[in-house]
Image (spheres, rainbow, N blue to C red):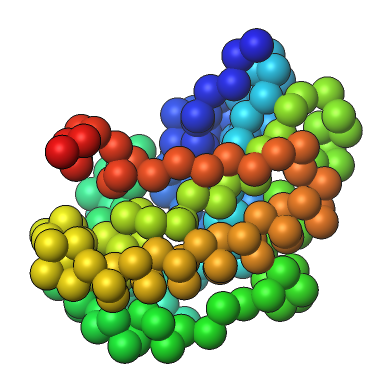
């Protein structure tokens, strides 16, 4: 069986669209997965949650900007076929107090937000013709890097091992609720994985 770990980025071109098109309208990301499956005949693939709301944008001097809800610039594209770049690239490092203080959203709360609806529609459209997994890979270092930045996340296990472990438990509990939500919308399985935990970043020693 062929089960590629593939996202919308390479598949959006199957539809004759650009990455900018998909970032403006996340619904195209799900359409790209379907188009890729139809074109290449995967036996299965993973489905992340990208959201569903179309984003506001503006073009200035030939550069496309995606906007925050308040109208400020959030991302920009130097080319429509490139992924967006953050306008403010300074990384705010979260404290462990902030990380552990974030509420864990339940399965029902996640579903009520509406972000899983596009994934649900794709599951219905596939209708059992492929093995589908929900992407819930947020248990350990992927999430820690997102909160603490790469350098801190790789040094914290030496400096703050107890806090790192507590954070991993917190991330895992949220990941479980996300997995439950995927089950509710009809996924066949759950995909987990963590690039930042791989041996290319952290040696077995």
Q: Is residue 25 above or below residue 188?
A: below
- Looking at the image, residue 173 sits to the left or right of residue 150; the answer is right
**Residue 65 in view:** no
Residue at the spot 65% in from the left edge and 17% down from the top edge: 42
Residue at the spot 29% in from the left edge and 68% down from the top edge: 164
Give the quadrant of residue 10: top left
Residue at the spot 57% in from the left edge and 46% down from the top edge: 135
Q: Is residue 165 above or below residue 180?
A: below
Residue 47 placed where, x, y %? Answer: 62, 42
Residue 49 placed where, x, y %? Answer: 59, 54
User: Depth check: 78 or 196 in front?
Assistant: 196
Of the 4 image quadrants, the one containing the N terminus is top right
Q: Is residue 156 above or below residue 81?
A: below
Give the quadrant of residue 204: top left
User: Depth check: 95 or 118 in front?
Assistant: 95
Of the 4 image quadrants, the one containing the C terminus is top left
Residue 118 placed where, x, y %? Answer: 72, 53
- Looking at the image, residue 110 sits to the left or right of residue 142; the answer is right
Residue 195 placed where, x, y %? Answer: 33, 41
């Amino acid at each position: 069986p062929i089960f590629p770990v593939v996202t919308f980025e390479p598949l959006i071109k199957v539809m004759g669209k650009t990455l900018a098109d998909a970032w403006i309208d996340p619904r195209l990301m799900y359409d790209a997965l379907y188009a890729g499956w139809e074109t290449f005949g995967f036996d299965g693939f993973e489905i992340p949650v990208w959201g569903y709301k179309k984003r506001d944008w503006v073009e200035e001097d030939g550069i496309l900007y995606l906007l925050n809800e308040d109208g400020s610039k959030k991302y920009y594209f130097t080319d429509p076929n490139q992924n967006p770049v953050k306008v403010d690239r300074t990384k705010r490092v979260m404290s462990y107090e902030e990380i552990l203080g974030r509420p864990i959203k339940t399965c029902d709360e996640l579903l009520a937000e509406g972000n899983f609806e596009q994934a649900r529609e794709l599951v219905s459209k596939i209708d059992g013709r492929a093995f589908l997994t929900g992407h819930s890979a947020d248990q350990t270092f992927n999430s820690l890097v997102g909160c603490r930045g790469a350098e801190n996340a790789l040094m914290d296990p030496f400096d703050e091992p107890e806090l790192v472990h507590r954070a991993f438990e917190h991330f895992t509990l949220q990941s479980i609720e996300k997995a439950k939500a995927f089950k509710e919308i009809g996924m066949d399985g759950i995909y987990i994985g963590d690039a930042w935990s791989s041996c290319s970043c952290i040696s077995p020693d």
